[in-house]
């Protein structure tokens, strides 16, 4: 459009401005005589500041959109589509070296797996009329069970719009179907138990205000199948969810043709889905045996034994006179139960504590008999039934009984914190989170502390009042919410109201929660096109990834996109469909950045998709000969931000070199850093701090306007991640790191990372607050967010991978006979524009007995806490001190147990509480981790810290304590129960030179190939006949043999489990890669520290010296 090139305020146009530019376990020490595990417990300078409208150069402008199949391969991109290939289209020669399905030939895959329904309709954004756009992807996976409509995301808009009044403004047509309070609703039903059809038919809804109401957004199958009825809002409706990474539908059924997010790489023969059904596929959901009826952990919730002499009164100080741990010999489940195992006089390396993998799936009810139950280990496989407390996936505490006093907590040496992962992926067999709409009155809240109604608020006085479980205030029950109490003292409707019987619910937000209309889903892509980025293939990889991922953006009129490229200047593109070709608009000023005054820099994806794809295809060619080496990263981000300032959204930046120009430019601090580290300079850690506050200031502004930044670093050199990462850290995003970027092996990961980034469950413009019972107060929040007030954190975006740690401190005593409650409230906007409040409740017993703290300690949650605290300290303390602090934390906890709880007489014994018996091993792994060990690059350490910042509990341990899996003998395995063989202990005795091993930590997959591997094995796995022929840059292919198929299955299953496309690297003995691999063999003695046995001896000696 001609008008697009004349921005009013910038009168001085400079038409001469440039176009895109030319362009082994150690010896057994005698010191530790016994080990005991206590189970008891470029324009010219001065150029006028004006935007420079200009049409794209001929190379770009003249290029018509070629048919998908005919598109050229980008320079530097892999020759064949290595990933996400639908088996049946292997010969189609998809563009971009990838495998985007040809338009119309295939349906886009839904973000989490299964194909979309055949006749699905998009959800109306605001209860308005249904649009005409077809086939929105189902939100959290899988195909709609039996229905023809795709379920909305996060309990999506369709159902909400039809069953609840529109949250904003006028009534919708659908609203009349289901008045929130009043007449009989159109659909009165119980929610289907698993998001699918109700097992036993629909039941009447509870009466409310004289009439039934749609207590739940769910619908019976018959209604859901009706074309005029939406699906129930699904929060990961199990029947519809698939494994997160495009796995096949559960229960082993082959996946219908469709794009597989993390599919096998080139599967020439197999029609099989690249992901096998998960091992839990055939477990009857919610069926017996339950977690407790198995006896597992139930003992942990028996009434605590009275143990005189424990906190509150005198403490036993006599060695060996500690309080005996509560004996629970009948409880087979170890972590929370207890027996004592002692070994003879010396440490037997085969008897020291090591992780055991859980064999079977656990069915876990969050509460039983009016008490909290102890959650299964985060790393185990479990299916949660929410019976009052939230799923531990959403929130779990470092201890499962809360100490009554701060003194008791201090004495234990343990942290008191919860890890909140509000959008964590549910198990496919879990019931979806239910949506509750209170209509105009909004969710019921305590009038004093503003806590949301939850199962632990106690109704009294025939239901006329309710006592807040957090602050104790007695509230009047709103007239509309009255209900009589039953003989048990509970409201008669308690079991029918999710907010009164479920640990987690979502509320429809009323106007009081809105400061503006919910924002649209905006995605703005910024691509580095400087010389290095072009020449290394990074630009082509980014363009290819974006082009393929567009189909995974949430569909509908509210999804908008924009794009810009940058080197020493910033190039915007107008993508209006009416135009013959995208229009390039150049912003040359990289100090005082602005954005072209265009209305069409960001457009609904439906209006510009073709232009965008054409542009993405052209960009690598347009800048093919670019000689501009400078990269104005900060300025480009700022300009992108300005373009999306009015809406907010996601800014996805693809950066390949150290930002060298304009606002926020950086310098190479690495050389300096290395020198400092080798000379032992105590100031070396300062290089892990941001160089200055420029980017932080920028990030704070981004956050204020709800812009979340993700940075994809595809680089060959130091880029100062310590400085760059501040932006994602503050805005709810993350850093992705591909170093050294390989145009051969990294594009697959780049695409899959991007795809997961935009398709995983997520919300925008979020505010989160955690409340807790009186007696405790929130101490601090840790994670990727922006904090402006002490009580809340702002998250421009939050997704299923992000975890926030919240620490607490006592400000009073807690009463032992009462429970201590935690409530996380997350106000956010769904990708479809619904404003929601997700409320996550956890209520735990209080205890005044130290032994209970040890008994109910949650090892993995505590370790995640230690990991984050250690990482947090890195920029401000020398590494040796961080390592010492981590070790001391472990020692203090064990010493407390030894001193106060253990019932052992010999001081020569190291006594480990059962629940924390792996703490020394994990502490040793932490001390040897990339973040804490001396060697390594600055950027590697900074990246590690950025990962840790928002890492979940379930990924925290593997990050430092990886899995080691032999893959050379997968075909000879007898135990076919699990796809992945039992991991080996992490010591070099287990790594043989005639084997091939995969070591994975959720981020990297190191494949170690021994020097004496059978050539047949090499041929089968790698397609080469000798070690010498192994490629340096690994692209794991699938060949036509069983071993290759199994290796791919294992890798894909790990990707699914970790929600991460591993970066695979080959490692060989005698090469740096082999040394890197061996540095993860935690049990070995290494330059980075003790062997495991030595470490146990060290810990024991420290404890002994503290005891005397
Ligand atoms: Zn209250």
Image: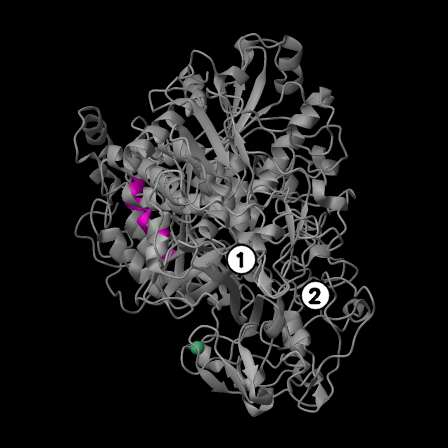
Which residue is under mark 1?
Answer: 423
Specify whether residue 721 is painted magenta. yes
Q: At x 79% / y 75%, what residue is drawn?
A: 203
At mark 2, the secondary structure is loop
Q: At x 59% / y 46%, what residue is drawn?
A: 328
The image position of residue 593, as x and y in percent, is 26, 57
Using the image as rendered, state which of residue 749 and residue 851 is in the foreground. Answer: 851
Crowd class of label 1 (few under 14; some 14 to 19; many from 20; radius 10 Å): many
- Nearest to N terminus: mark 1 or mark 2: 2
Q: At x 37% / y 42%, what residue is drawn?
A: 899
Specify whether residue 449 is painted magenta. no
Label 1, label 2: how far apart the Cα atoms are: 24 Å
> Is residue 1068 left or right of 792 when viewed as pictured?
right
- Residue segment shown in magenta: 720-731
Residue 588 seen in render: yes
Q: At x 28% / y 32%, what residue is drawn?
A: 1105
Q: In this view, does 719 lie above or below 116?
A: above
> Is residue 908 left or right of 468 when viewed as pictured?
left
Quadrant of image for the N terminus: bottom left
Which residue is under mark 2?
Answer: 121
Q: Is residue 769 above or below residue 632?
A: below
Dots 1 and 2: beta carbons under 8 Å? no
Q: Is residue 870 above or below residue 532?
A: below
């Amino acid at each position: 459009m001609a008008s697009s090139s004349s921005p009013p305020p910038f009168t001085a146009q400079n038409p001469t401005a440039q176009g895109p530019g030319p362009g082994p376990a150690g010896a057994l020490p005698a010191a530790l005589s016994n080990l005991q595990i206590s189970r008891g417990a470029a324009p010219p300078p001065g150029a006028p500041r004006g935007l420079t409208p200009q049409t794209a150069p001929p190379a770009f402008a003249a290029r018509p959109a070629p048919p998908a199949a005919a598109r050229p391969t980008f320079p530097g991109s892999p020759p064949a589509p290595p990933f996400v290939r639908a088996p049946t289209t292997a010969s189609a020669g998809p563009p971009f070296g990838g495998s985007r399905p040809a338009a119309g030939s295939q349906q886009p895959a839904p973000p989490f797996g299964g194909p979309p329904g055949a006749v699905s309709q998009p959800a109306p954004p605001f209860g308005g009329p249904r649009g005409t756009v077809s086939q929105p992807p189902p939100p959290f996976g899988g195909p709609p069970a039996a229905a023809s409509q795709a379920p909305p995301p996060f309990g999506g808009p369709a159902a909400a719009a039809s069953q609840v009044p529109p949250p904003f403004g006028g009534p919708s047509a659908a609203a009349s179907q289901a008045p929130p309070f009043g007449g009989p609703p159109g659909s009165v039903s119980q929610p289907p138990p698993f998001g699918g059809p109700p097992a036993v038919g629909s039941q009447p809804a509870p009466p409310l205000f004289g009439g039934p109401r749609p207590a739940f957004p769910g619908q019976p199958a018959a209604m859901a199948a009706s074309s005029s009825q939406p699906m129930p809002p699904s929060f990961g409706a199990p029947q519809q969810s698939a494994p997160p990474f495009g796995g096949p539908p559960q229960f082993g059924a082959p996946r219908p043709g469709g794009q597989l997010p993390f599919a096998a790489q080139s599967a020439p023969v197999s029609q099989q889905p690249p992901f096998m059904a998960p091992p839990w596929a055939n477990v009857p959901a919610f069926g017996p045996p339950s977690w407790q009826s198995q006896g597992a952990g139930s003992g942990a919730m028996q009434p605590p034994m009275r143990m005189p002499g424990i906190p509150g009164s005198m403490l036993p100080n006599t060695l060996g006179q500690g309080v005996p741990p509560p004996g629970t010999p009948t409880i087979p489940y170890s972590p929370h139960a207890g027996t004592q195992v002692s070994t003879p006089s010396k440490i037997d390396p085969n008897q020291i504590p090591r992780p055991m993998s859980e064999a079977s799936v656990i069915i876990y009810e969050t509460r039983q008999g009016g008490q909290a139950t102890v959650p299964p280990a985060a790393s185990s496989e479990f299916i949660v039934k929410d019976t009052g407390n939230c799923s531990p996936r959403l929130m779990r505490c470092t201890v499962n009984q809360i100490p009554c006093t701060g003194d008791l907590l201090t004495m234990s040496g343990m942290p008191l914190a919860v890890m909140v992962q509000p959008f964590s992926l549910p198990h496919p067999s879990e019931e979806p989170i239910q949506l509750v709409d209170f209509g105009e009155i909004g969710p019921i809240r305590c009038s004093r502390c503003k806590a949301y109604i939850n199962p632990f608020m106690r109704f009294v006085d025939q239901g006329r009042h309710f006592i807040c479980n957090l602050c104790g205030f007695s509230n009047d029950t709103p007239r509309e919410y009255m209900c009589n109490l039953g003989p048990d003292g509970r409201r008669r409707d308690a079991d029918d109201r999710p907010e009164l019987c479920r640990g987690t619910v979502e509320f429809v937000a009323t106007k009081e929660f809105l400061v503006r209309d919910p924002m649209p889903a905006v995605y703005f892509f910024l691509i580095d096109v400087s010389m290095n980025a072009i020449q290394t293939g990074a630009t082509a990889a980014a363009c290819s990834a974006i082009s393929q991922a567009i189909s995974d953006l949430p569909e509908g009129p509210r999804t908008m996109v924009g794009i810009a490229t940058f080197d020493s200047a910033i190039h915007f593109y107008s993508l209006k469909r009416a135009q013959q070709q995208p229009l390039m608009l150049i912003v040359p000023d990289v100090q005082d950045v602005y954005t072209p005054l265009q209305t069409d820099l960001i457009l609904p994806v439906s209006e510009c998709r073709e232009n965008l794809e054409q542009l993405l295809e052209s960009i690598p060619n347009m800048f093919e000969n670019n000689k501009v080496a400078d990269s104005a990263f900060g300025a480009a981000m700022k300009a992108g931000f300005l373009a999306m300032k009015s809406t907010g959204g996601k800014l996805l930046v693809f950066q390949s070199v150290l930002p060298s120009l304009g606002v926020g430019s950086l310098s190479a601090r690495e050389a300096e850093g290395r020198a400092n580290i080798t000379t032992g300079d105590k100031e070396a850690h300062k290089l892990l701090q941001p160089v200055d506050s420029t980017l932080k200031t920028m990030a704070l502004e981004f956050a204020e306007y709800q812009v979340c930044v993700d940075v994809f670093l595809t680089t060959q050199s130091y880029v100062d991640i310590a400085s760059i990462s501040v932006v994602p850290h503050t805005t709810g995003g993350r850093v992705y790191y591909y170093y050294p970027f390989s145009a051969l092996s990294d594009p697959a990961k780049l695409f899959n990372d991007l795809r997961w980034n935009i398709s995983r469950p997520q919300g925008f413009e979020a505010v989160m607050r955690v409340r807790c019972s009186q007696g405790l107060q929130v101490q601090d929040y840790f994670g990727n967010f922006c904090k402006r007030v002490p009580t809340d954190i702002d998250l421009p975006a939050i997704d299923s991978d992000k975890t926030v740690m919240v620490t607490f401190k006592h400000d009073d005593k807690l009463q032992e006979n009462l429970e201590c409650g935690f409530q996380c409230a997350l106000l956010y906007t769904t990708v479809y524009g619904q404003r929601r409040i997700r409320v996550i409740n956890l209520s735990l017993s209080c205890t005044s007995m130290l032994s209970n703290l040890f008994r109910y300690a949650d090892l993995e949650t505590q370790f995640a806490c230690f990991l984050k605290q250690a990482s947090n300290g890195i920029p401000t303390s020398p590494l040796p001190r961080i390592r010492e602090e981590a070790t001391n934390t472990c020692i203090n906890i064990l010493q407390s147990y030894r001193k106060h709880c253990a019932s052992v007489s010999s001081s020569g014994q190291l006594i480990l509480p059962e629940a924390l018996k792996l703490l020394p091993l994990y502490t040793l792994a932490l001390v040897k981790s990339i973040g804490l060990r001396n060697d390594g690059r600055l950027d590697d350490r900074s990246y590690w810290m950025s990962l840790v910042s928002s890492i979940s509990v379930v990924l925290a341990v593997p990050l430092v304590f990886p899995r080691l899996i032999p893959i050379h003998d997968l075909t000879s395995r007898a135990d076919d129960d699990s796809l992945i063989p039992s991991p080996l202990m992490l010591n070099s005795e287990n790594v043989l030179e005639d084997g091939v091993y995969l070591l994975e930590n959720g981020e990297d997959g190191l494949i170690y190939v021994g020097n004496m591997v059978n050539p047949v094995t090499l041929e089968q796995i790698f397609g080469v006949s000798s070690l010498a022929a192994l490629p340096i840059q690994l692209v794991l292919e699938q060949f036509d043999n069983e071993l290759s198929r199994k290796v791919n299955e294992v890798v894909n299953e790990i990707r699914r489990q970790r929600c991460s496309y591993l970066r695979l690297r080959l490692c060989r003995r005698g090469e740096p890669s082999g040394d890197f691999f061996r540095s993860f063999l935690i049990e070995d003695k290494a330059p980075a520290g003790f062997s495991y046995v030595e470490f146990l001896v060290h810990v024991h000696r420290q404890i002994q010296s503290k005891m005397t």
